[in-house]
Amino acid sequence: MERAEWRRLPPCPRARDEHSARMTGPRYTPLVQTLPATVPFVGPEVQEREMGHTFRARLGANESVFGPSPDAVEAMARESTQIWKYADATNFDLKAALAQKLGTTQKNLIIGEGIDGLLGYLVRLLVAPGDRVVTSDGAYPTFNYHVTGFGGGLVKVPYRSDHEDLPALIAKAVEVDAKMVYLANPDNPMGSWNTGAEIEAALDTMPEGVLLILDEAYIEFAPAEAVPQIAPDDPRVIRLRTFSKGYGMAGARVGYGIGAVDLIRSFDKIRNHFGMNRAAQVGALAALQDQDWLQSVLTWVAESKARIAEIAVANGLTPLPSATNFVTVDCGRDGDFARTVLHELVERGVFVRMPFVPPHDRCIRISAGTPADLDVLAEVLPQALAAANADAAS
Amino acid sequence: MERAEWRRLPPCPRARDEHSARMTGPRYTPLVQTLPATVPFVGPEVQEREMGHTFRARLGANESVFGPSPDAVEAMARESTQIWKYADATNFDLKAALAQKLGTTQKNLIIGEGIDGLLGYLVRLLVAPGDRVVTSDGAYPTFNYHVTGFGGGLVKVPYRSDHEDLPALIAKAVEVDAKMVYLANPDNPMGSWNTGAEIEAALDTMPEGVLLILDEAYIEFAPAEAVPQIAPDDPRVIRLRTFSKGYGMAGARVGYGIGAVDLIRSFDKIRNHFGMNRAAQVGALAALQDQDWLQSVLTWVAESKARIAEIAVANGLTPLPSATNFVTVDCGRDGDFARTVLHELVERGVFVRMPFVPPHDRCIRISAGTPADLDVLAEVLPQALAAANADAAS
C-alpha cells in the first residue's frame, strides 16, 4: 500500500537560521517566567533508562503491585475497542456508583485526572498570585508544585514527631490568612495519621474562608480511627480520594473529591471537561464494584508491610507505624546516610524513594511488594547498608 | 467475606445545619468568581440520558467510527494488567517514535492529555488577565473556554467565505498586541482550509512576540497543499496534533505539540507531569506504527464523506468542501432552520452538531460514519427536513 500519509506529512524542514536568530519567542506571563521547569518526581522509567537496566523490584511510588481487580482489567480491555469515542464528560456512571457507595449525591462529587489533577484545579480555583497556602514541611511536593505554579505563597509548618501537626497548620493559616490548608491523612511520606476525632475537632477551630484539603489517597489502608466524620456539604473541607492506591490503578488517572455543592460545581468553570480516559472510567467503576478484591489487597498489603518491618529490624533499622501501603524506615542516622542507602538500593535494582526534608530524610520509604519483591529487598538491603556504612566510614 | 472497608468508610453523615448555615465557602480568586460553570460541549451520553434512548448513529463529535488500529486496541488491552504503574511522565517511547516519524527531536515535542489539555497549558503559559488573544468568530469553543478561564481577552475576527481569514487574524493581532493567534487548519466546524503556502507567507508578516497556535487536529485528512512547511524550531508557531481523529483514539486523550525547544520545555513548568494514562501511551505508539490502518481509515472517511454529500444533495442541501473527517452541510436557510433540522435529527437518533454563530449556523456538521450509520442518516434526514419545513411554515 502506498503510504500517502507519509508523503503528505513530510519530515519537518530545518529551521531557517535567519528567522530563528532574529525572532524572539512567545511572551510568557510574568509568573511563568519565575517558574523552574522541574518535575515533582523523577519516574522509575527515567531512572531505568539512565541506569541501562530495569528495576528488580518496583517499590518506590506506592503503587499497588497487586494490581487492580481482574474485573477492572477486563472492563478496560473490553473498552479499548470503544476508545474511538470521547469519554462521558460528566463521569455519570462512576459518579452514580460513588454517590451510592458513599451515601452522598452526585452534586457532592467531582471526578478528575487523579488527585494530582484535582489539586491543580483546586489551587487554580482559590489561589491568585500572592495568596497564602499552608502545608507541612516535607508533605506532598506535587501540591506545592501547583501552588507555586499559580503564584501562591507556600507557608510550611514542621511535622511534630513524624505527624502532620494539624493544630499548628490551622494556627498558621490564621496567622497568614491562608486560603487553604493541606493535610494528607494518612500522611505521605511518613505513613503516620491524625485521628478522625482530631480532624473533626480541628475543623471547628478553622476560621471562615479557609478550605481544608484533606488528601485521603491512602484512606483504604487506614484504621477506622483515622477516618473523620465529615458531611459532604461541609463548606470547610474537600476530601480527595483515588483509584491509584488501594484500587491499584495509578496509571489510569482517576481521582475524586467529596465536597460542598458550590465548590464541586466550581470545577466546571475550569476543568478539562473531556479530559478523562474512557477505559479508565469503566475500569474504576468495575474496581469500585469489586470490594472483595480490595479486601484481598488490604490483606496482602498488611502482610507485606509486616515483612518489610521484619526485614528492616533484621538489618538494624526501625520501621515506623504506617496507615498506608508503604513503610517508612528510619535508617537511624542523618539524611546523607539515608540518601546513600537509597542510592545503593537503586543501583542494585530496588526502586525506593525517601522523604525530602530533615528530619524525615533519615528515612527511606518502601512500598508494599509481592513476596518476590521483598525477597529482592531482603537480599539487597544488607548490601546497600554495608556499602553505605563503608561510605560513611571513609 | 466481611466487608471491612465498608465498615471503615461509613456513609457520609448529614451536614450539620448550624455549620452549613453560618459557614461561608472558600474564597475563590476574583477571576474564578467571574467565570460561568459551563461546559464547552454537551456530550452525546448526556443527551442520551435526557432522551431516554441511545443514538442510532453517533456522527456529532468527529470521532472515528472506524476505530483505532487493531494493534492499538491489543496494546491497550494488554497494558490494562500493568495499569497499577504510573505512566512514564516523560512519554519517552511515544515521543521517540514521533520524533523519528516527524524528523525532529524529542526536545521539540510535548505530549499531553489531548489537544484540549495542551491548549489549556499553552494559554496558562502565555495569558495573564487582560492579555489579548485572537481567534475566529465561530472557531473552537474549548480554546475560548481556556482563554476566558485564564482571564484573557478574546478578540474575534470573522471568517471570510467560510474560511478562517489568516491575514485578518494577524492584522487584528497587530492591532490589539495579542499574545497568541489561534488557527485550526483544516478548520472545525467549517471543514475548510488555508493552504500551507498561505500560512507560511502569513507567518512572515506576524509581529515579534505573537505565537501562532496551529491546531492541526484534522491534518491527516487534509490534502498536501494544506500542510505548511514549518521548522520545529520556529519560535513563531506551535503545531498541535492528536490521536483523537485520524488515529481513532478520542477516548484515550493523547495529543502532541511540535514547537521550539524553549516553548516545549516551558510546559514542564506547569503541566500535570503524571497526567497521562499508561494504556493510552502504548496505544498511541501502536497506532502510530500502523500507518496502513491510518491509510484505510482515510479511504473509508473519503468514501463516507462522498456518501454524506450525496445524501445532502439528494435532500436539496449543499455539502461544503471538507479537508477533515466530517462534512458541513449548508441547509440553505437561517440558523433557526438549521437548529430545527439538527433537533429533529437528534430526536430521531442521529447525533450531529452544528456551528454556533451566524452565518455558519445555517449549516449542520456530520461526521464520517460507517455505511450503516449513513443508512440511518439517509432514512432520517428527509423526515427531519420535513419536520423542520413544517415548523418553519407554521
Image: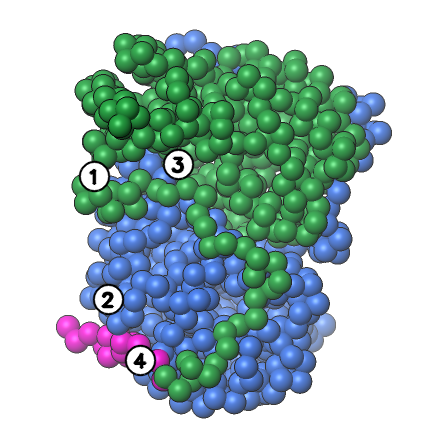
Chain colours: A green, B blue
Question: Residue under circle 3?
Answer: A250
Q: Which mark is residue B217?
A: none
Q: Which kind of residue does numbered mark 1 sit on?
A: Thr
Vertical comparison of A70 with A133: above or below: above
Query: In this rendering, would A66 be left or right of B138?
Result: left
The chain identifier of the residue carrying mark 4 reads A
Rounded to the nearest whole Å, what is the CA distance between mark 3 and mark 2?
A: 29 Å
* Secondary structure of the residue carrying numbered label 2: helix
Rounded to the nearest whole Å, what is the CA distance between mark 4 and mark 1?
A: 36 Å
- Foreground mark, 2 or 1? 1
The chain identifier of the residue carrying mark 2 reads B
**Of marks 3 and 1, which one's residue comes earlier in the chain?**
1
Work out whether residue A64 can be spotted: no
Q: Quadrant of the C terminus of chain B?
A: bottom right
Q: Which kind of residue does numbered mark 4 sit on?
A: Arg
Question: Residue under circle 2?
Answer: B100
Rounded to the nearest whole Å, what is the CA distance between mark 3 and mark 1?
A: 19 Å
Please say if the residues under marks 3 and 2 sit with CB atoms less than 8 Å apart.
Answer: no
For label 3, the crowd category at 10 Å Cα-Cα, with few meaning under 14, some 14 to 19 and many 20 or more, is: many
Q: Which kind of residue does numbered mark 3 sit on?
A: Ala
Q: Which kind of residue does numbered mark 2 sit on?
A: Gln
Q: Which mark is residue A14?
A: 4
Task: Give how far across and how far down residue A175 sits, in percent.
Answer: 76, 33
Please say if the residues under marks 4 and 1 sit with CB atoms less than 8 Å apart.
Answer: no
- Foreground mark, 4 or 3? 4
* Secondary structure of the residue carrying numbered label 1: loop
Q: Residue at image x 29%, y 70%?
A: B104
Question: Residue under circle 1?
Answer: A54
Rounded to the nearest whole Å, what is the CA distance between mark 2 and mark 4?
A: 14 Å
For label 4, the crowd category at 10 Å Cα-Cα, with few meaning under 14, some 14 to 19 and many 20 or more, is: some
For label 1, the crowd category at 10 Å Cα-Cα, with few meaning under 14, some 14 to 19 and many 20 or more, is: some
